[in-house]
Amino acid sequence: SYTRRQAICEYSKFSLEDFSSKGAAGTREDDDISSFDWWASYGSEMPVLQKLILRLLSQPVTSLCCERNWSIYGHIRNIKRNKLTSQHTKDLVYVDSNWRLLSRKRKEC
């Protein structure tokens, strides 16, 4: 598609540091400016890549979901229930997680 080809072309420009702005190449490796701020300031020459990268950099970085899942897994598969199969344990974690989501939704209503 056009967007994919455009993103590849823009990535090539970025890799070769082919910028029309004088400050863009010089500040790319600078520790004083965050990646998000750099793309917000200098990424307008590469609009498709800028939009994609700003969306990626806007994602919060957290391990909370994994830790919650491991906690549920630990409650389900413990010393008393260590003979559960891997698939059965995954299914129980899935059911428990969705049950908690549904319970939370009901409380909101």
Image (cartoon, helix red, strand yellow):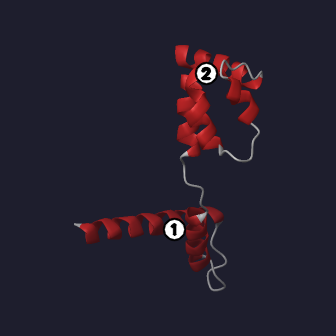
Whether 72 is drawn above or below 13: the answer is below
Asked whether, in this view, residue 76 is left or right of residue 108, the answer is: right
Which is more N-terminal, label 1 or label 2? 2
Q: Which mark is residue 7?
A: 2
Q: Total of numbered circles in the picture?
A: 2
Please tell me whether mark 2 or mark 1 is closer to you in this view: 2
Q: Nearer the viewer, residue 28 or 96?
A: 28
Q: Which residue is mark 1?
A: 92
Q: Position of residue 2 (x, y in %)?
A: 54, 13
Q: Are marks 2 and 1 in contact (CB under 8 Å)?
A: no
For the residue pair 42 and 16, the one nearer the viewer reads as 42
Residue 104 image position (x, y, % from top left): 34, 69
Q: Where is residue 49 drawn, in percent x and y?
A: 59, 27
32 shown above or below 81: above
Q: Where residue 79 appears, x then y in whole percent?
A: 66, 85
Residue at 75 percent across and 31 percent down: it is 26
Q: Amino acid at mark 1?
A: Leu
Assign the N terminus to one quadrant of the image.
Answer: top right
Q: Is residue 17 left or right of residue 54?
A: right
- Residue at point 63%, 81% (across, down): 78
Find numbered disc 2 in the image and state the secondary structure of the residue it sits on.
helix
Q: Where's the C terminus, which quadrant? A: bottom left
Query: Which of 63/71 is in front?
Result: 63
